[in-house]
Image (cartoon, rainbow, N blue to C red):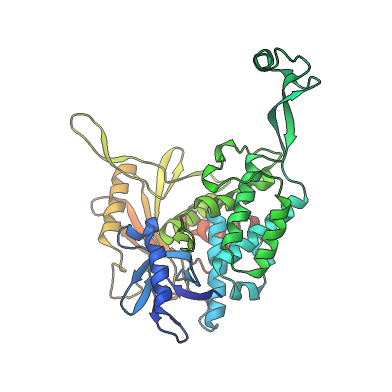
Amino acid sequence: MTQSYAVREWDRLAYGDGDGQIPERFADRLAALAQRSTFAGRGGSGVLEHGRHSLRARGVVGILAASGCSLEILPKIDVAPSESVHDQNAAIRKRLVHMLAVALNLKIDLGSITDLAWQRETLLEVLIRIFTDKLTEAVRKGMPRRYIEQEDDLRALRGRLDVVRQFTRHAVNPSRLACRFDDLSEDTALNRVMKAAVLHLSRTSRSSANQQRLRELAFVYADIAETPPSALRWNDIVMDRTNRRWRDLLNMARLFLRGRYQTTTGGAGEGTALLFEMNTLFEEYVGRLVCRALAGTDLAVSLQGGRLFCLAADTTERGLFQTKPDILIRRANAVIHVIDTKWKRISSRIDDPKQGISQGDVYQMMAYAQLYRAPRLTLLYPHHPGLGSDELVHARHRIAGHETILETGSIDVANGENVLHRLRRLLIGGETEVPAQGQ
């Protein structure tokens, strides 16, 4: 039986056998699995701090599953404090899945999952549940098929004659014709990806309900060739009007099989992981929302655009230290606003005019001001109750010697209501209502 544990990012999980503790043998397995992640050696943030008395989560969230145990790392999102820990974790899971759906541009009906499921299932099991429900609905409407070129030796001509093969292989046996023809088949690159995802999740899921759904889907895909994830031909998948309803499923399969953010798979019995770096997820979540919020205006949005260099070599003019602002907003090809997202808590202390903002972040924004000539720069953070009820702009500063304004703002990721309207109010101060379907 698998023992499940949960911890919030930057919190500790003490060793022991009591409630809210984890046996040290399990902690060792999970820490070893986390150490194989590419996040483990990234700038000191990593996944887990393997201490003498506790595990400490860092700035990476998701699920680690080793032999006999699993650890769910949840983001530090502020939800209603009056709720129980199970209710709080359920609310955080729901917001995290919402952020993933926005970042991956997925259409997910979160209302189809019961409150009990949010409480009892881990993030991974919730994502598997969403994937299997969507895949079951899709295959009921018919699996996508494509014409695939086939070769066969037949008694009657089908398609066209392969002249070279005919006169080399059947020169002395003209009763067989070397035919090349197109055959409408379900054994396509897209369906092979779906089968690979089903088989992979069958080995990963610990939920009996999910296992039942996956067995049913494996039966549906029995006639599709089994392909190892490393051999899947992703580039052969062509999304068009005939299969566009499979786009969300393809993105989810890519998340499970290729690690849209980052996955770790150990050897037999070592474990698996599905991990998300919150800095990256928050950046993509906000970027997608900004694109939606400004759709239909005279403003154009670029994500990870710009790419201007801070320095140029004297002799070769080769650029050095390329910049990649998270979000650039342009009007008539001129950059008017640069936004950089930071997944960290800013201070609400009235005696701290810097609000805990790092000097490096300010230097970075000053470089953007110099290179992109934008009159407005924003450092955008997640909102927390200590900042009060106003989640938008908290402070504005003028960069010395310039007219450029550097402001700090926040967005409440725990509150999904009217999020596009709230963002649009921050960006252009407009009071125009944004259509609800984009949220």
Residue furthest toward the right?
Answer: 156
Q: Residue at x 66, y 39 (%)?
A: 188
Q: In screen coordinates, is 321 left or right of 162?
A: left
The image position of residue 437, as x and y in percent, is 65, 56
Q: Quadrant of residue 83?
A: bottom right
Q: Quadrant of residue 360?
A: bottom left
Q: Residue at x 51, y 50 (%)?
A: 258
Q: Residue at x 28, y 75 (%)?
A: 351
The image position of residue 138, as x and y in percent, is 72, 51
Position of 296 relative to 438 (above/below):
above
Which of the two residues, 118 or 19, is positioned nearer the viewer here? 19
The image position of residue 64, as x and y in percent, is 47, 66
Which image quadrant: the C terminus? bottom right
Which of the two residues, 161 or 71, is positioned nearer the viewer here? 161
Which image quadrant: the N terminus? bottom right
Residue furthest toward the left?
Answer: 314
Q: In screen coordinates, is 369 left or right of 326?
A: left
Q: Quadrant of residue 156?
A: top right
For residue 431, say whether it is visible: no
